[in-house]
Image: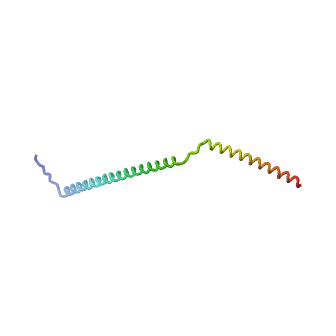
Amino acid sequence: MQSLHVKLELNESLDAKRSLLQSEMNFIKIAKDIQNYRDLRKKELSKKIAMRTSLNQASYAILKFKRSIPTVSTDKEETITKEEKVKFDSLEDELKNIQKRLERLNHSVI
């Protein structure tokens, strides 16, 4: 294989060297950016895994808490509300009875 030699002027050779060095610098910056991206991506994934683990633990704790709470049947609630209604009605009746007595007393005093 024969080698060819090209004669360049001083300015041309300096421009070519500058351009080559500038290109090398740009490649190094790109490589650093790619490495930085990979590092950030690894951190992101590890944080996502940690968050998922925390959410699973919280979900398990909530489920465990729900299971430990005693449940109340709805039948008992309905009977309680019926009893409260009866008590309320009887109180209303007593209130009306007392008002009638007060009216009689007021009429008899006058």
Q: Residue at x 80, y 51 (%)?
A: 99
Residue 74's place in the image compared with 34, above or below, is above
Residue 91's place in the image compared with 11, above or below, is above
Instruction: State the residue in front, 63 or 53.
Output: 63
Looking at the picture, how far across and down is residue 90, in whole percent?
Answer: 74, 46
Position of residue 98 in the picture relative to residue 60 (left or right): right
Position of residue 68 in the picture relative to residue 80 (left or right): left
Position of residue 74 in the picture relative to residue 17 (left or right): right
Residue furthest to the left in view is 2
Instruction: State the residue in front, 60 or 23.
Output: 60
Q: Residue at x 59, y 43 (%)?
A: 73
Instruction: State the residue in front, 39 or 69.
Output: 69
Q: Residue at x 43, y 51 (%)?
A: 54
Query: Looking at the image, how many numbered discs can be counted on the residues?
Result: 0
Q: Quadrant of the C terminus?
A: bottom right
Looking at the picture, how far across and down is residue 85, in whole percent?
Answer: 70, 45
Q: Quadrant of residue 20?
A: bottom left
Looking at the picture, how far across and down is residue 66, in whole percent?
Answer: 52, 47
Position of residue 47 in the picture relative to residue 16 (left or right): right
